[in-house]
Amino acid sequence: MNKLYRYSRVAFALLFAATACTYDFPETTEPDSGDLSLEKYVAVGNSITAGFMDAALYNRGQENSYPNILANQFRLVGGGEFTQPDIMSENGFAPQLSDPANGVILGRLKLNSAQQPEPLEGEFPLAEYNGDVADLNNFGVPGIITGQLFDPRLGDPAFIGTPLFNPYYARIASSPGSSTLLDDAVTSLENGGTFFTLWIGNNDVLGYALTGASNEALLTDELVFGQQIDLALERLTNVPGVRGVVANIPDVTRTPYFTTIDSAFIPLAQANVDALRAGYEDFNNGVAAYNAQVNANPDLSDEEKEALRRPSLSWTPGLNPPVIIDEDLPTVILPTPDGNIELPKYRMLTGSDYVLLSLPQDSVANGLGTMVPMSDQFILTETEAENIRSVIEGFNGIIESLVPENDQQVRLIDMYDIFNNFYENGANLGGIPLTNELAPPYGGFSLDGVHTNGRGSAFIANQFIQTINSGFGASITLVNPNNYPGNDLPGL
């Protein structure tokens, strides 16, 4: 069963464990910028930098973006104004839920009375930004991969309707079709900028994960990623007198998009169990015959036999995991009186696999995961998740190599470690929990399961502040995430 908006007293209790991130408020330290100048702060990144929440970019999300929260704290130590490209929309535009070509423009997600997220009516973000791009501070653009920092097609109207075009950048591009996002950000930084943050690269692996690891073309090549990050950092740090913080990539598989649905979520009565056992009887017999051959093979070690054996399918009355297709299972060819056949690569989902939040519940009710095995687009297998983590660790190794610990100009913030700790332990914010979940009022992620909400963004802002304070000898005041909005309760 989908536990998306189940209120969990158990989770509440666990969050007070001593291992959780803990903040006590209010602070009494006199704020000081140390040897930093924060007169003009420029943020560069993707959706989480822009304030994308609830599957859309809308007013409240922008107001509670982590760069805007940071800028408010910087003002206490001499920081200047922080200008964002205001979207001026209460519901915004949800690109993954909309179909503009057919007139379907949907906005942010909101909980309905059944505690399920539903999109509101939205607005396509084509209105041009009226301000001077050279004075803009937030260059977060939802959906971009690292290479698009350098691609003028990102804002070129000639590419509308293709993955190369991004309406969020098009509305702020200084010269649509010829300027690039990084060019515009560097120009702003050169126009009096003193400090920057760069958090990019999540989408270079996230897009692949969101498809259930079914389209490897969505993964950025590690060598290409390294060249792009190196060039972006070179451009930003070449601005005289500027200093900054660079964030690495968190484990995207540990966001609620992948962790919200339990592995056993399909309810079955005894009659359903009997029907499934009968329907898959030939398959299970084939598995048993193949495993017997493997076990009887004297040329195989116990470890090799274990790796080659195929699991059978089984069900019991109550909640069950789905049947899935796992292409990483060993290929099995079985002889039959009618010729050789290949045994389908079916198995039961395990607790080490992940079900995507995009899973259509109506399809499950109509047999998906039971009589119709679940395809790769709705799941991440344990192997796929491990491969994704390996790619992220490779990307992070590149980022870390470009930002050495003793660098006096740029400091690294380890978001990979921070979010792993948050996933395992949550946070205790002045006695109030923040969880790695969606369920209000304590969940730190917005309803799309990937991006943080206002409380989560404040938590992120504090991680940047702590890195700035320790890396540059500053004492900038932490914010209280409890003062920022989480997910609305149904009906609000």
Image (spheres, rainbow, N blue to C red):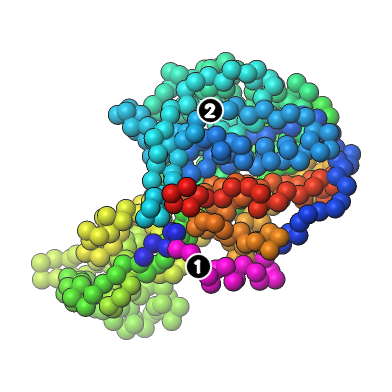
**Of the numbered discs in the image, which one, if any, rests on residue 427?**
none
Q: Which image quadrant for residue 39?
A: top right
Q: Name the residue under label 2.
A: 88
Quadrant where the N terminus is found in the figure: bottom left
Taking the image as shown, residue 86 lies to the left or right of residue 240, namely left
Q: Name the residue under label 1.
A: 8
Q: Where is residue 470 in the image (x, y as percent from the top left)?
A: 83, 50
The one nearer the camera, 443 or 44, is 443
Q: Which amino acid does label 1 sit on?
A: Ser
Q: What residue type is labelled 2?
A: Met
Farthest front residue?
491
Q: Does the magenta stretch include residue 20?
A: yes
The one nearer the camera, 247 or 327, is 247
Start and end of the magenta stretch?
A: 6-21
- SS class of the residue under badge 2? loop
For image coordinates 69% across by 41% down, the residue present is 69
Q: Where is residue 24 in the image (x, y as percent from the top left)?
A: 76, 60
Q: Where is residue 168 in the image (x, y as percent from the top left)?
A: 52, 28
Neighbor class of circle 2 (other Cα within 10 Å; few <14, some 14-19, many 20+) is: some
Neighbor class of circle 1 (other Cα within 10 Å; few <14, some 14-19, many 20+) is: few
Q: Can residue 198 be seen in this view?
A: no
Ranked by sequence position, the earlier of labels 2 and 1 is: 1
Q: Is residue 426 visible?
A: yes
On screen, 60 above or below 181?
Answer: below
On screen, 488 above or below 83?
Answer: below
The one nearer the camera, 483 or 257, is 483
